[in-house]
Amino acid sequence: MSGETAGRRAGGADREAVLAANRALYEALETGDLAAVEDAWLGAGEADDKGGVVCVHPGWPVLRGRAQVTRSYMLIMANTEYIQFILTDEEAEVHGDVALVTCTENILSGGEAEQEGELGPLVGGKVVSTNLFRRTEAGWKLWSHHGSPVLTSADEDDED
């Protein structure tokens, strides 16, 4: 087997591992598992409460450090009764110990109920995300997440 073929196989395995790590983040969010969300990110050895990880949720300022990032996910999970991510357009590029994943988050979430005790309507949205991972001894860990909302034709009609 040539070195090029071996490299392609390793690259394919790395790409699959990175995509699995990416999906694990969204699955943890769907189930409200904060420990799993924290585990998806770089650990205390690579990041601290002031830096080492960066997160930008749509419409939010830049969040830096494990404390701010974890708090943001706690707030999202505490204020969302239901959320489901259907990931499409997933692409991964691996370059050594760094990997870039882009995907579209097709999000279905529970909106506010009109009356207390009732379930609210389901609301859909679309976000394009760029997730940057680093290879660690514990596997691929999220280093940076950036999400940008995608305007739909309904959004454009609302502006008129």
Image (spheres, rainbow, N blue to C red):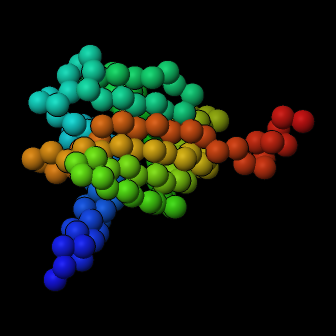
154 vs 85, left or right, is: right
Residue 40 visible to the viewer: no
84 vs 51, left or right, is: right
Q: Position of residue 49 (x, y in %)?
A: 23, 19
Residue at the spot 51% in from the left edge and 51% down from the top edge = 105
Residue at the limit of the structure toward the right, as seen here: 160
Q: Position of residue 38 (x, y in %)?
A: 24, 37
Q: Nearer the viewer, residue 33 or 132?
A: 132
Image quarter of residue 17: bottom left
Q: Position of residue 150 (x, y in %)?
A: 64, 45
Q: Position of residue 11 (x, y in %)?
A: 27, 65
Residue at the spot 90% in from the left edge and 36% down from the top edge = 160
56 vs 9, left or right, is: right
Q: Nearer the viewer, residue 99 or 127?
A: 99
Count of labels in the image: 0
Residue at the limit of the structure toward the top, as seen here: 50
Say above or below: 78 vs 62: below
Say above or below: 9 vs 118: below
Residue at the spot 76% in from the left edge and 42% down from the top edge = 155
Q: Nearer the viewer, residue 53 or 39?
A: 53
Residue at the spot 31% in from the left edge and 62% down from the top edge = 15
State which quarter of the image contains the N terminus. bottom left
Residue 22 visible to the viewer: yes
Image quarter of residue 40: top left
